[in-house]
Amino acid sequence: MEKEAHIIKEEIITKQAILLDVREVNEWQDGHFVQAKSYPLSLLLNKIPDDIDPNTHIYIHCAHGRRAEHAMKILLPFRHLN
């Protein structure tokens, strides 16, 4: 199910969901969404963030979608993803 951008934005602002940016640090430093949480895929491969509530919806962001898809496969057994 696809959600409209304004609904996703509202969920993130009201902390009903988080936006996880899985780009590398240098990409993050070049620019990022204000409410996003940086957690590079290279770190995610070794450790799942323990500061994310497993009942919180997670939206994953990267530059082109490939890393987001990989992150989703890692997190799917542990978290609620969209």
Image (cartoon, rainbow, N blue to C red):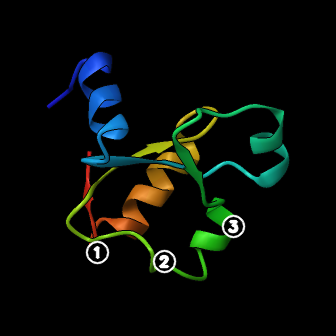
Q: Are marks 1 and 2 in contact (CB under 8 Å)?
A: yes
Q: Which residue bears the numbered disc 2?
A: 48
Q: Give the Cα distance between marks 2 and 3.
A: 11 Å
The x and y percentages for residue 3 are: 21, 25
Q: Are marks 2 and 3 in contact (CB under 8 Å)?
A: no
- Residue nearest the viewer, comparing 32 with 14: 14
Which amino acid type is marked by label 3?
Ser
Q: Secondary structure at mark 3?
A: helix
Q: Which residue bears the numbered disc 3?
A: 42
Q: Mark on residue 19?
A: none
Which residue appears at 45% of the width and 74% of the height? 51
The x and y percentages for residue 30 are: 83, 33
Which amino acid type is marked by label 2?
Ile
Classify residue 29 by image quadrant.
top right
Above or below for 63 versus 48: above
Quadrant of the snapshot with the N terminus: top left
Q: Give the Cα distance between marks 1 and 3.
A: 18 Å
Q: Of label 1 and label 2, which has the lower sequence position?
A: 2
Residue that sits furthest to the left in the current view: 1
Above or below for 79 versus 61: below
